[in-house]
Image: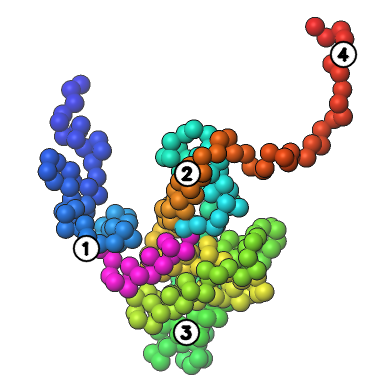
Amino acid sequence: MSTTTEQVTGWWATAISDISPGVIRLHGYPVEQLIGRLSFADTIWLMLRGEVPSPGQSALFEAALVSGVDHGPQAPSIAAARMAATCGVGLNTAVATGVGLLGDVHGGAGQECMAVLADIRGRTTADPAGAEPAGTDPAGTDPAGTEPTEAGLAGAVSDVVSGVLDGYRGAKRYFPGFGHRFHPRDPRRDPLVRAVEDAVRDGVVEGAYLRIGLEIERQLAPVPMNVDGATAIVYSELGFAPELGRGLFVLSRAVGVLAHAWEEHGEGRRIKGPIPPPLLPAYRGPEPRDLPADRH
């Protein structure tokens, strides 16, 4: 069976980039028109969404990307990249080492939180429990009695959030995006939440995910929202799928990983382990012993 040219060229068919000699177009836009006119954040948006973001969308998106750039060498992704940089590997391998550690536990909470927010949003909009039937509760329905009002939706969100949190408590699971092992209150939470509030006020985003996130925080008090929860709200409000949450965090954290790997490379140390040489990991194995004499 012969293979046609169309079958070969269609093997990696893409709607993202159009490349030919002398031509580079990204979602139809010539790259020479993008250079100097779009920010890097705008270009990420274009590549993932196919369109250029509005100024309001761009500002909110960039705020979230900036917030996750770095968390110091105590973060495993940063520490691993720094250690790799002392082992004679290339800078790209050091960066890949750090980024490769961003999994479900370290780096995955934002994506998981986005999935929870989407689930709650879906349940409260599809079946807004707590909104009274038309005509029975003016506080819970719109004037025409056809759509649940803010008060009705707020009650629905509160009920669904309560049920979701009960499920996490019953399973003894950490709720993603809330609490922090290092910060009593994550310093990135407030500016991100304010940015979303401003975007809601300006009509850039709807605000449904913000309401859900704040209700979760209210019911989890005194456990505050962390950067994963705040960026989950931002990315959800901007319409990104939950599955992209970790990828966006990887793009953000890769900047810090690169910076730390480069700094460590410049210090010239070789084979830098996880703790200083005078210290050794605690040993908890058997006492010193000899191999039996009859063992050949």
Q: Amino acid at mark 2?
A: Gly
Which disc, if any, is residue 150?
3
- Is residue 16 something that shows in the picture? yes
| Residue 204 vs residue 254, the one in the foreground | 254
Residue matched to label 1: 37
10 Å crowding of disc 4: few (<14), some (14-19), many (20+): few
Asked whether, in this view, residue 98 is left or right of residue 172, the answer is left
Q: Point out the tag, 1 or 2, that comes first from the N-terminus.
A: 1
Q: CA distance from mark 3 to mark 2?
A: 56 Å
Residue matched to label 4: 292
- Kindly report which numbered mark, 2 or 4, lies closer to the viewer in this rendering: 2
Q: Is residue 100 above or below residue 198?
A: above
Q: Residue at x 19, y 53 (%)?
A: 31
Q: Amino acid at mark 1?
A: Arg
Q: CA distance from mark 3 to mark 4?
A: 78 Å
Write down the quadrant of residue 284 in the picture: top right
| Residue 94 vs residue 54, the one in the foreground | 94
Secondary structure under badge 1?
loop
Q: Residue at x 86, y 7 (%)?
A: 294
